[in-house]
Image: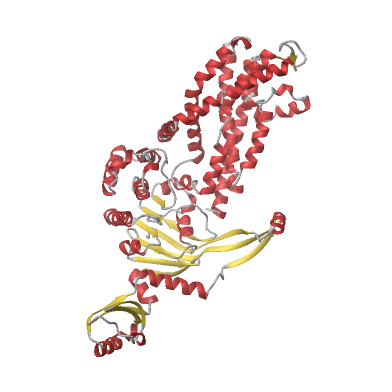
Amino acid sequence: MPAIAVKNLSKVYQVYRKREGLFASVAGLFRREYREVKAVQSVSFDIEPGEMVAFLGPNGAGKTTTLKLLSGLIYPSGGEATVLGHIPWKRENAYRRRFSLVMGQKNQLWWDLPAQESFRLHKEIYRIETAAFERRLDELTDLLEVRRLVSQPVRELSLGERMRMELIAALLHSPDVLLLDEPTIGLDVVSQRKVQDFLKYYQSEQGITVLLTSHYMKDVQALCKRAIIINEGELKHDGPLSDIIDRFSNHKVIDLLFAGSEVPADLERYGTVFEVSPPRAKMEVPRNQIPEILTSLLAQYTIEDVAVQERPLEEVISEMFTTTTNQSRAPNEEIASTSE
Amino acid sequence: MIGTVRVNWIILKTCIEERFVYRADFAFATLVRFLPIVTNIFLWGAIYAVGTESAHGEMNGYTYNEMVAYYLLAMVGRAFSSMPGLASGVARDVRDGTVKKYLTQPIDMLGYLFWHRVAHKLVYYCVATGPFVLVFYLCRNYFPGWPDSWTIAAWIASLIMGFLAGFLIESLIGLISFWFLEVSSLLFIYMMINYFLSGHMIPLDWLPDEINNVVQYLPFKFLAYFPAAIMLGKYTHAEMAHELLIELAWIVALLALNRIAFARGVRRYGAFGG
């Protein structure tokens, strides 16, 4: 049985639409126009126990809405979902004791008190046995290298340290499912790396199911083999991360190191040159023409080194979002008007 | 059951610790709140002295001494029933999404807020008892003397129930933020109504009969007037018991309303926002 099963899940929000100007504000008192925003449209996917899946999409794609549905914060407009066999929006304690939601931009710890006080409260809320609690706290503070900091008020911690404390609070009760919404947002490279390393280690050790949204492709590449891509509320891709590049990128990058100190001026006839630092040049070429282009380049110039690379995942995904957004700009907004 | 008690105990303990973080500011704020009490005693003196040689006349059945005693006792009632920041805090939690914490964790939001408030009050009493005792000692001559032990017991019960009623009314206003997000104007209206109808400003028996008859049916009088009136001997023992039962009924009704508002509010939050 999948740990997370989502079938035709939809969520439509009604958003108050205010026209510009004073007159419109007064008119809005009597007659309100609502805009329907289809945040999630008939999304289906299954996640098996122990999988770590990236949930990708631009801002407003419906990622956070889906996570909110799965954590039971909001009710769907249609479709169904079960997590660990529970319907999330029933909010049964039995379910709430088995998952955790961590939002990078939300703080769950007591601001003015040391994190250990929040942890102690979690121990009671989640009914964690004292011995198990001590053991886990020990393990988690060691892994995240924050042992010294648990007795310092949370407000005095750096963002990176606070995020690590949030993760401890979320994991103390050994949840089977972890929903992470932008866990590394705003963190410096070192803290990002620490969080990534920790998540990777912890997930493989404990075999928990993780669904992660992030805008940092480095997080995603470091942690997940599978990615679900959603845009404008619709599922665009569900499969191995590596497939994204095969499927959505028709180009590869050729990195050339020329003999001498110059880069030939007529490289553009082979592809798009996007980086030149003589004697080195990088260009994008169509995937299916690589053998011909390479043969021709090697025949024509003296080349010391050549490498063929995939385009960075970040670029591929960003390009994919731009094209889909341009093709279908805002078809999912309908205007409904009601009087109140 | 034992688990729930333990959770509440830890919430209470943690909240008390939190209150002590800004102890200096808190102590200062508490003490400064005593200043208006002193000025109000002088104000009543001036009002009673209008047109007379000394402040010994009677107004609407209250002598100056009784008025000061009433005012001080009403202040004690308010020390239990006032809930600074409760409704606005709930509204803020709904607006900025902190409420998610209560929905994703196996914890009851109202229970949490309740124990948070108990902690808040306990710390307040630690700081305020001294000044209160001092003010009552200095003003001892205004009081008619100690009432019998049944009256004192009824007074203590009325203070505790005043705390419950005050908490439930304000949390209910806070829960309205699930519908309106911003409740500050509503809260302002409530504060105004409370000021008049709880007996904070003047004793309720000063109000015209037609108004007083209605006010007696509302829960606000339990927030300040009722405890003070018990101590001033305005009720017989039977009347006290009767009023306390009515207050209990209000508390049960308000609790039910809170539960309904929370359940519906969360449903609405789930349907529209989040």
* Nearer to me, B170 or A91: B170
The residue positioned farthest toward the front in the image shown? A261
Give the quarter of the image for residue B238: top right
Give the quarter of the image for residue B158: top right
- Would residue B200 be found to the left or right of residue A190 on screen? right
Q: Position of residue B208 (x, y in %)?
A: 77, 25
Q: What residue do we see at 42% from left, 67% from top?
A: A229
Q: Position of residue A83 (x, y in %)?
A: 42, 56
- Would residue A23 be found to the left or right of residue B255 on screen? right
- Would residue A120 be found to the left or right of residue B141 on screen? left
Q: Is residue B256 among the parts visible in the rendering?
A: yes
Q: Quadrant of the C terminus of chain A?
A: bottom right
Colouring of the image: secondary structure
* Nearer to me, B210 or A311: A311
Give the quarter of the image for residue A15: bottom right
Q: Position of residue A159 (x, y in %)?
A: 38, 49
* Nearer to me, B41 or A302: A302
Q: What residue do we see at 74% from left, 26% from top?
A: B212
Q: Quadrant of the N terminus of chain A?
A: bottom left
